[in-house]
Amino acid sequence: MVRDLTCPLVDLDEQHSWCRKRQIKVDAAKDDATAVGEQWTWAAICRTSKLIIAWHVGKRDQESADTLVEDVRARLVVMPQITTDGLGLYAQPIAANFGPAVPYIQTIKIFSARPGKPGTSEKYAVPRGVDFIQKRAVFGTPDPAKATNFAIERSNLTARQWNARLRRRTLAFSKKLSRHCAAVALHYTYTNLCHIPRNMRVTAAMTAGITDRVWTLEDLMVAALVEPAGEKPEPQPLAIPKPEGTAIELPAGRGWLRVVDGGSTGANPGPQPPPKTPGLAPATPPPAPVSAAAPATRAAVEPAAPATEPSRQLELFAWRPKPRAPVQLLLFGAPPGEPTKE
């Protein structure tokens, strides 16, 4: 059901859990390393509709990151802005599936441990004197004002509250990996089709346009137990959404050419008056011509202002308005073999 989505903002994150025993107690000689120990729930959410686009249960490795990003790419038809945390495993699959022109930005949280208290809760203390959250653009031209992970973090909190298998320091953790995956799938399917978020009037699936009604528990159980499993979606061409403000569409669906202002205030300041040079007298206009019949005026009889030094005169007349900082204009989806122009 979740396919052909037009999600403008997509957030990705991973959530820790374990199966049968903690990772520190796993015996590589006796236990199956793939089914025992740490199990991470990788999920992607559409921030505008709160829809869980895709999820995957596996280790915190490159293979799991590739699986999640490939699944997300196959379900979208519009190029989104992607936001993740500072985990470096996302960059490679995002570039491989969405291309280097996708707007991808990371939000990195900076924690600082208090000296003398290692291993305590103080290791997650907010640092002083620096920004707690730092944003770093990886690909494309993302909008930093829209870069946040609040939607996927809130979804992870809801998963821990509703699914006891994900809670810490309890006996409700999963003992079998297949049961763990089924519980995660049931939770995300319920939140998509049956649950109405507090700040919305319909379910996430209705907001995303994949259903027209609120599913009941009976509908969900019938679909899960009776209907056959659906086929995996195939990746479709991604449309480049029109950016905000003035933009010109490029031919062959290559994207949009935006008008970007590089000034700090966002407006064209235009020509500015020349800067004042210390010790340099302002230039005075030449006196008006005086006819022979006209009586001598005060401006004509007064001595002229002392001439400035030739070097300072050249500096004054050679002044030009300071150019604005260059701004990168990225042409989305350049054809193969043609370099991207800025």
Image (spheres, rainbow, N blue to C red):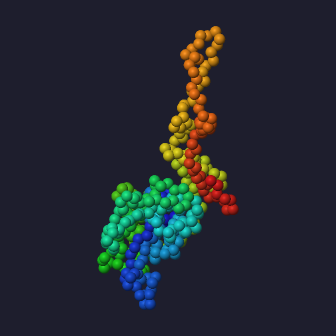
Q: Observer-nearest residue: 181 or 284?
A: 284
Give the side of residue 98 with respect to residue 26, left or right.
Answer: right
Residue 39 place in picture, x, y as percent: 42, 77
Residue 163 falls in image quadrant: bottom left
**Vertical relation: 165 (above or below) 244:** below
Looking at the rendered structure, the number of numbered marks drawn on it comes to 0
Q: Observer-nearest residue: 249 or 96?
A: 96
Residue 72 place in picture, x, y as percent: 51, 66
Residue 67 place in picture, x, y as percent: 52, 72
The residue that appears at 44% across and 87% down in the rendered structure is 28
The residue that appears at 46% across and 59% down in the rendered structure is 135
Q: Observer-nearest residue: 166 or 342?
A: 342
Residue 120 visible, this angle = yes
The residue that appears at 64% across and 57% down in the rendered structure is 340
Residue 151 falls in image quadrant: bottom left
Residue 207 falls in image quadrant: bottom left
Q: Observer-nearest residue: 298 or 183?
A: 298
The residue that appears at 56% across and 48% down in the rendered structure is 325
What residue occupies the far bottom of the structure in this picture? 30
Residue 290 place in picture, x, y as percent: 62, 15
